[in-house]
Image: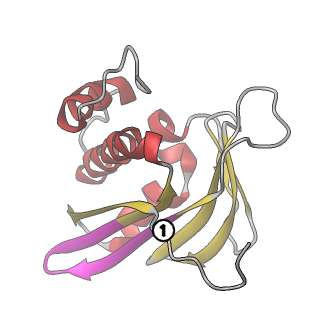
Amino acid sequence: MSDGAQFTHAHMVRFERHLPGSPALAWNFLADTGRLPGWYGAGSIEPRVGGAVSLMGAHIRGVVTQWQPPGRLAHTWNVYNPGDAVSSYPESYVILTLAPSGDGTAFTLEHLPIMDQFVKLNAMGWHTFIDMVEAAVRGEPVQAREHYMEQNAKRYGVDLSNPLG
């Protein structure tokens, strides 16, 4: 054991997308889980710092760390297997940022750290989320999650029949 610092690197996924409309319009789809049920599933985000995050039937749980409507929402991200009281995965952080940009909104999503074996899956999943948000903000019908995931699985080289394989 050493008493000196250890320097390591952690994977992170970062997306930037230009959305039509104002940050307030996009915020509604990020902060209100009922507006995008195809992604969030049964869940809620309590609208305050320290608020509970429960998504996809409590498969994802966390705590809001930043609540700054309509510009920034950040929360912890913990993955729970069915029936588990404690997550067997390390905690990570999701940061969603919206800013006026020209005739629309600059949307940035960051998620870190990402475990090595989940890098491609994570990129596929968040790309799917952003595609769904963009469709919703445009006022277009939001397709089922699987529709976008099939497209993005090809983009990131994920075999949906064996995603960790």
The outermost residue toward the front is 1
The outermost residue toward the right is 85
The image quadrant where one finds the C terminus is top left
Q: Nearer the viewer, residue 157 or 42?
A: 157
Whether residue 135 is situated above or below residue 47 in the rendered picture: above
- Side (left or right) of 93 relative to 148: right
Q: Residues within 10 Å of mark 1 (few under 14, many from 20)?
A: some
- Which segment did they paint magenta? 94-108
Q: Nearer the viewer, residue 59 or 81?
A: 81
Q: Nearer the viewer, residue 96 or 101?
A: 96
- Residue identified by numbered label 1: 95
- Side (left or right) of 160 relative to 52: left
Which SS does the magenta portion mostly show? strand
Q: Position of residue 99 (x, y in %)?
A: 32, 79
Q: Position of residue 35 (x, y in %)?
A: 48, 46
- Side (left or right) of 26 relative to 150: right
Q: Position of residue 41 (x, y in %)?
A: 57, 34
Q: Residue at x 45, y 41 (%)?
A: 118
- Specify whether residue 138 is painted magenta: no
Q: Residue at x 70, y 78 (%)?
A: 2
Quarter of the figure with residue 49: bottom right
The kind of residue tagged 1 is: Ile
Whether residue 66 is situated above or below residue 120 in the rendered picture: below
